[in-house]
Image (tube, rainbow, N blue to C red):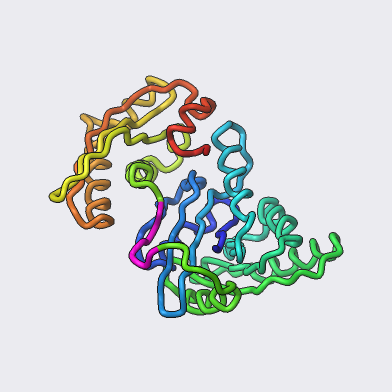
């Protein structure tokens, strides 16, 4: 079991998709895209590695944000290896140091992966210096294995997998070999719809948007998924629809195409937009969405 942790928008979801060779976690340029704990399973002749893709830790100002932070921090409990992903294009931030302080006393091996090495900037040395500085302050002798990668191009991924197999202990196989992820289908479908809106809207609305798939009818010749896209204010509904409903149609079409590729059969989406006031602060809504256990 390998927990993939780090601050928001360092490329954790892109990394897990690259590691598995298929899409199991949604990706967008918007920070805090991942809201749930997503498990991805890598099977190969050397064995099986189970990756936990966690929400990015960030400065939370609402209930959903606090839930996401708790989910990420709890994910490192009981794992065999912790993979700390860092953004090589930026200098260390408070959230990066927060993870370092937490992992300096974690019993499992730590791999510090400096991602985005395909970009011109490289702040690996700054991260290593920050780790050493915090370790000295805390009187810790724990070392991390430092690697560099690009989740986008695949550079360094082979070396990363080799290192993870070397660090992971031998044990019983946890999942059948034909399973890529145990993430519930309704949540996965909802995530893909949300991802498409993130790409359309960027910073305009995404964090007040949620998708709930309420019914999923699975037939051999295709699936029908029905659900709601939730916003907090009536004024936000026209934004999701776009001019003459064009944005909504684009999102549904893009999501149906992506889902068909993921599951290997046609998937029809029947969605409507619903106002759910302050849903981010409503425990029962967050539970329905799978954000709290």
Which residue occupies the foreground of this view, 245 or 168? 168
Residue at position x 64%, y 73% in the image: 146
The residue sitting at the left extreme is 221
Which residue occupies the foreground of this view, 6 or 165? 165
* Residue 233 within the segment the image draws in magenta: no
Tell whether 25 sits left or right of 272. Answer: right
Any part of residue 185 in sight: yes
Residue at position x 41%, y 34% in the image: 210
Which residue occupies the foreground of this view, 28 or 70? 70
Give the residues drawn in magenta, as a range: 176-182
The image shows residue 207 at horizontal and vertical percentages of: 47, 36
> Does residue 174 sit above or below 260 in this rendering?
below
Any part of residue 247 in sight: no
Give the quarter of the figure containing the N terminus: bottom right
> Does residue 3 sit above or below 172 in this rendering?
above
Residue at position x 38%, y 22% in the image: 275
Q: Quadrant of residue 233?
A: top left
Which residue occupies the foreground of this view, 3 or 129? 3
The image shows residue 190 at horizontal and vertical percentages of: 35, 41
């Amino acid at each position: 079991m390998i927990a993939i942790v780090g601050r928001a928008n360092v490329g954790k979801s892109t990394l897990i998709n690259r590691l598995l060779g298929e899409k199991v976690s949604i990706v967008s340029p918007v920070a805090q895209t991942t809201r749930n704990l997503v498990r991805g399973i890598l099977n190969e002749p050397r064995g099986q590695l189970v990756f936990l893709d966690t929400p990015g830790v960030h400065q939370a100002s609402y209930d959903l944000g606090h839930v996401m932070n708790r989910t990420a921090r709890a994910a490192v409990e009981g794992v065999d290896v912790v993979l700390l992903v860092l953004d090589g294009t930026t200098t260390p931030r408070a959230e990066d140091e927060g993870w370092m302080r937490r992992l300096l006393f974690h019993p499992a091996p730590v791999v510090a992966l400096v991602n985005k090495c395909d970009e011109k900037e490289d702040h690996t040395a700054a991260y290593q210096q920050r780790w050493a500085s915090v370790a000295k302050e805390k009187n810790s002798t724990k070392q991390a294995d430092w690697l560099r990668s690009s989740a986008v191009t695949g550079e360094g991924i082979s070396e990363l997998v080799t290192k993870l197999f070397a660090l992971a202990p031998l044990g019983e196989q946890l999942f059948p070999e034909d399973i890529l992820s145990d993430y519930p289908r309704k949540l996965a479908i909802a995530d893909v719809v949300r991802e498409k809106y993130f790409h359309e809207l960027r910073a305009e609305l995404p964090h007040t948007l949620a998708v709930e798939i309420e019914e999923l009818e699975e037939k051999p010749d295709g699936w029908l998924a029905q659900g709601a896209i939730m916003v907090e204010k009536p004024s936000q509904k026209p934004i999701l629809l776009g001019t003459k409903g064009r944005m909504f149609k684009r999102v549904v079409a893009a999501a149906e195409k992506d889902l068909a590729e993921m599951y290997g059969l046609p998937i029809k989406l029947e969605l409507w937009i619903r106002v759910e006031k302050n849903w981010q602060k409503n425990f029962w809504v967050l539970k329905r969405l799978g954000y709290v256990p």
